[in-house]
Image: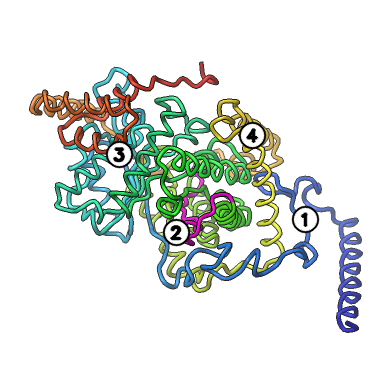
């Protein structure tokens, strides 16, 4: 006791001496910014110094523990990256299926370990390339997919039982996943052997990204259908990637991204439990998440550590899960597109490297690194190779993978992790009180919170309270030249010709029957996935399937946009 008292008294004297020295120095040379401006990019205040006093209420076993042990603050896997690196999963999609397939094979040759697909805007919205609503957009922001024949070209030469594929698709997710399942069966691969992820997260669309088709309730019903079908038929597939990425890109703070994403996840769990009557441990292990890794290094690391802890608590305390695999938050990370600048684009390489390192130190299972040119165009071969090499350098050269959760125990990191968890739970409980996330979306709550945060941040950039190098500080008038990828307009003409050829050669009666069967299933409330698979095999198009949904469930118009 005497020793402990002596140590405390000594520590107190040391702190007082330090504070006196700070005051003396600051009186001569003031800080670079006022106290109020020392904050994270999301405006969480940051103190000058963190000490044991900032984590005095923490308990190692309860709050931090060991890797692979509850509450998984330090990661799900007991061996971390020593056992296996994160999946190098570069986002690819441009022009037509053949062009994207070529990019896939280039990336696999360069060392990518998982595939990821971006679809063009018509496909994302559930329209075919020849729709009047699609004109001029074919292949511009991703790959154009109209029918199973396109999908077979996209996956040509890819062993679907040996490599996982992520598909960034939301309203038409059932149709595109049905094509993937059909392509596997055509390759002779049973559905039990394929693995991957469909984003399939409509709640974040209503909140942030706004690729909308049907109203919230039937949209969530379709997602629950995929969860049920995957649980019973495609057990290695992640049927939702619950996405905070787009919430953050819309202007949310790190805490808002954390809270709204996890509350979306809870909403999906509750919907499956209610509609499908599955046991939580039958499907929860295949839920996955998707986070943004922004430029504020420590804030992002702490966000990811807090996310695992919140999810573990939610699964055990809210949903009484008994399977520890349900308690794991497994997530993919992408570096922040909104942090990239058109000005001085080579600065984006440094931004992406910093954000990628934060994701690794935060314990991501999968990572996409943005290319330096993405603020201008789809990534060129030149830029995407640099982005992939960024991940490989972090894995092989930096030592970041040598030990697990190397920042654990830092007074600052643990205090900031706790603060982010506390603030996220406050948001989650507020949404609970509103009746859940669908009810909160209908009230406009998360949308307004994000809008306010985005407006505040932009004002801080405009006033130079927050700095973006090359934008509001260290500005250059010189233009930097970078390789520029453009999609030829002839891609659209050729894609329309292929689609029309498919319509001419298919069995029209069989296609119509499949669509009628799908419509009947929608009206009865049956699981749509078996009907979608039959429809794509009959060469029904993405729009034909989505038009069934629009007819039965109605179309949604965002009240904030109309």
Q: Nearer the viewer, mark 3 or mark 2?
A: 2
Residue at (40, 20) in percent of width and height:
555
**How many neighbours does mark 3 have within 10 angstroms: few (below 14), some (14-19), or many (20 or more)?**
many
Coordinates of residue 55 in the picture (x, y in percent): 75, 63
Coordinates of residue 56 in the picture (x, y in percent): 77, 65
Answer above or below: position of 376 versus 307: above
Identify the image quadrant of the N terminus.
Answer: bottom right
Q: Nearer the viewer, mark 2 or mark 1?
A: 2
**How many neighbours does mark 4 have within 10 angstroms: few (below 14), some (14-19), or many (20 or more)?**
some
Disc 2 secondary structure class: loop
Residue receiving disc 4: 458
Which is more toward the observer, 240 or 448? Answer: 240
Q: Looking at the rendered structure, which numbered label has been put on residue 389?
A: none
- Quick one: label 2 or label 4, which is nearer the N terminus? 2
Disc 3 secondary structure class: loop
Whether residues under marks 2 and 1 lie with C-beta atoms below 8 angstroms apart, the answer is no
Q: CA distance from mark 2 to mark 4?
A: 32 Å
Left or right placement of residue 396 versus residue 46 in this view: left
Which is more toward the observer, 217 or 521? Answer: 521
Residue receiving disc 3: 94
Magenta stretch: give its range: 318-337
Left or right placement of residue 120 versus residue 494 in this view: right
Q: CA distance from mark 4 to mark 3?
A: 31 Å
Q: Nearer the viewer, mark 4 or mark 1?
A: 1
Disc 1 secondary structure class: loop
């Amino acid at each position: 006791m005497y020793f402990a008292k002596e140590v405390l008294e000594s520590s107190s004297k040391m702190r007082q001496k330090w504070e006196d020295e700070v005051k003396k120095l600051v009186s001569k040379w003031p800080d670079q910014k006022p106290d109020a401006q020392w904050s994270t990019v999301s405006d969480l205040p940051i103190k000058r110094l963190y000490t044991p006093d900032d984590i005095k209420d923490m308990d190692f076993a309860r709050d931090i523990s060991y890797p692979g042990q509850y509450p998984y603050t330090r990661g799900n896997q007991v061996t971390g990256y020593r056992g296996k690196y994160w999946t190098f999963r570069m986002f690819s999609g441009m022009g037509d299926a053949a062009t994207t397939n070529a990019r896939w094979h280039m990336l696999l040759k360069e060392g990518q370990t998982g595939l990821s697909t971006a679809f063009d805007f018509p496909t994302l919205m559930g329209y075919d390339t020849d729709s009047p609503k699609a004109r001029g957009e074919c292949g511009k922001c991703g790959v154009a997919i109209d029918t199973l024949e396109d999908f077979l070209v996209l996956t040509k030469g890819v062993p679907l039982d040996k490599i996982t594929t992520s598909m960034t698709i939301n309203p038409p997710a059932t149709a595109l996943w049905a094509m993937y399942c059909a392509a596997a069966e055509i390759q002779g691969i049973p559905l039990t052997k394929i693995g991957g992820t469909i984003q399939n997260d409509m709640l974040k669309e209503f909140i942030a990204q706004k690729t909308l088709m049907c109203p919230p309730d039937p949209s969530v019903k379709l997602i629950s259908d995929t969860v049920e079908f995957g649980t019973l038929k495609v057990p290695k597939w992640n049927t939702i990637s619950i996405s905070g990425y787009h919430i953050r890109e819309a202007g949310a703070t790190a805490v808002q991204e954390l809270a709204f994403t996890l509350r979306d996840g809870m909403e999906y769990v509750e919907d499956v439990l209610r509609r499908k009557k599955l046991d939580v441990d039958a499907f929860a292990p295949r839920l996955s998440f998707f986070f943004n890794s922004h430029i504020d290094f420590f804030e992002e690391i702490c966000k990811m550590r807090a996310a695992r802890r919140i999810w573990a608590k939610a699964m055990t305390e809210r949903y009484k899960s008994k399977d520890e695999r349900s308690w794991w938050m497994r997530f993919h990370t992408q570096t922040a597109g909104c942090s990239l600048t058109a000005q001085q684009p080579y600065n984006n390489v440094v931004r992406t490297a910093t954000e990628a390192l934060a994701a690794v130190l935060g314990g991501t299972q999968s990572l996409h690194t943005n290319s330096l040119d993405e603020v201008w165009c789809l990534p060129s071969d030149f830029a995407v190779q640099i982005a992939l090499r960024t991940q490989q350098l972090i894995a092989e050269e930096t030592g970041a993978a040598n030990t697990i959760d190397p920042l654990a125990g830092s007074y600052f990191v643990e205090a900031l992790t706790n603060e982010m968890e506390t603030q996220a739970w406050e948001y989650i409980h507020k949404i609970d009180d509103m009746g859940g996330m669908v009810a909160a979306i209908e009230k406009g709550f998360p949308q307004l919170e994000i809008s306010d945060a985005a407006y505040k941040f932009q004002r801080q950039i405009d006033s130079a309270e927050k700095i973006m190098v090359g934008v509001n500080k260290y500005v250059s008038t010189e233009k930097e030249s970078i390789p520029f990828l453009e999609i030829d307009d002839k891609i659209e003409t050729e894609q329309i010709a292929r689609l029309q050829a498919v319509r001419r050669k298919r069995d029209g009666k069989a296609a119509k029957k499949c669509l009628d069967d799908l419509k009947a299933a929608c009206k009865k409330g049956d699981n749509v996935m078996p009907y979608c698979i039959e429809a794509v095999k009959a060469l029904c198009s993405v729009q034909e399937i989505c038009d069934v949904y629009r007819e039965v469930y109605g179309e949604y118009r965002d009240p904030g946009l109309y």
